[in-house]
Amino acid sequence: MHIGLIGGIGPAATDYYYRRLISTFAAKNVALELTIVHADTPTLLGNLTANNTAAQVAIYSRLTDRLVAAGAECVVVTSIAGHFCIQEFEAISPLHVVNMISEVSRSVAARGLRRVAILGTRTVMETKFYGGIHTAEIIPPSGQDLDQVHQAYVAMASAGVVTDEQRAIFHTASRKLVQDFGAEAVMLGGTDLALAFHEKTSEFPLVDCAGIHVDAIVKLATACAPTAPGTKPSAYR
């Protein structure tokens, strides 16, 4: 299956998806068919803040038309912040949308987690992952901690690199949510948080949303029967 990525939001997230897809397909000895189109991070963040769903969906629609022309058979938004309008986009997309929110919800349920801390943009934290988790309580930072996490995340996502100060903000907030509020794991509610956390070295369990998303993409792309370019797989019609 030819995978279409809407990348650029932000650059580090796009790099994460690209590298993980390359390594996973190589490990499976399967050829990777992939096209990436670029969306603008400041524009996305502005539309997210203004809750301008129509404007962001129009951007995704235009970019998806490019992916269709390139032969893509599914489309992926490589941003959790960018999922604020995912249902509206799914409704009009000519390609199957691999929805991160649905995939993460299934993973949280499968792990039996009941209390999960969350980091990310203000909107992602305040909406508790857009209300998409139904089997666990999602616990965001509060007060100044929430402000600091949001500001650090936006700066990191825009730059594509993490500073020591930003990493300290993320880890301090996570530690509080685990120790003081009984969170069993920390949800990386922003795809760029892979810059600040690593599952093998983290002091607490993680819900790696981007990793879960990529695994779902791989499963779909390697299990689905081939389809004609520009059409949804029959299982998703």
Image (cartoon, rainbow, N blue to C red):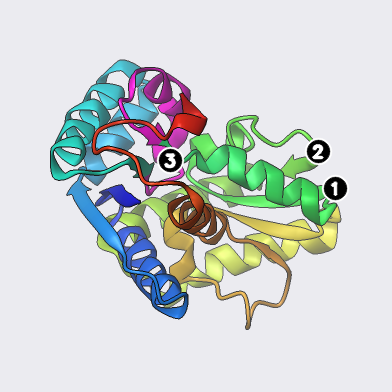
Range of magenta residues = 77-96
The question of residue 83 being in magenta is answered with yes
C-alpha gap between disc 2 and disc 3: 21 Å
Please name the amino acid that badge 3 sits on. Answer: Ala
Local SS, label 1: loop
Task: Please give the label number shown on residue 28.
Answer: none
- Residue labelled with disc 2: 135
Please name the amino acid that badge 2 sits on. Answer: Thr
Q: Is residue 37 visible?
A: yes
Q: Nearer the viewer, residue 201 or 93?
A: 93
Please name the amino acid that badge 1 sits on. Answer: Arg
Question: Is 184 left or right of 77, judged from the image as shown?
Answer: right
Task: Please give the label number shown on residue 114.
Answer: 1
- Residue labelled with disc 3: 81
C-alpha gap between disc 3 and disc 1: 23 Å
Q: Residue at x 46, y 41 (%)?
A: 98
Among the two numbered marks 3 and 1 on one chain, the one whose residue lies closer to the N terminus: 3
Q: Position of residue 149 (x, y in %)?
A: 52, 53
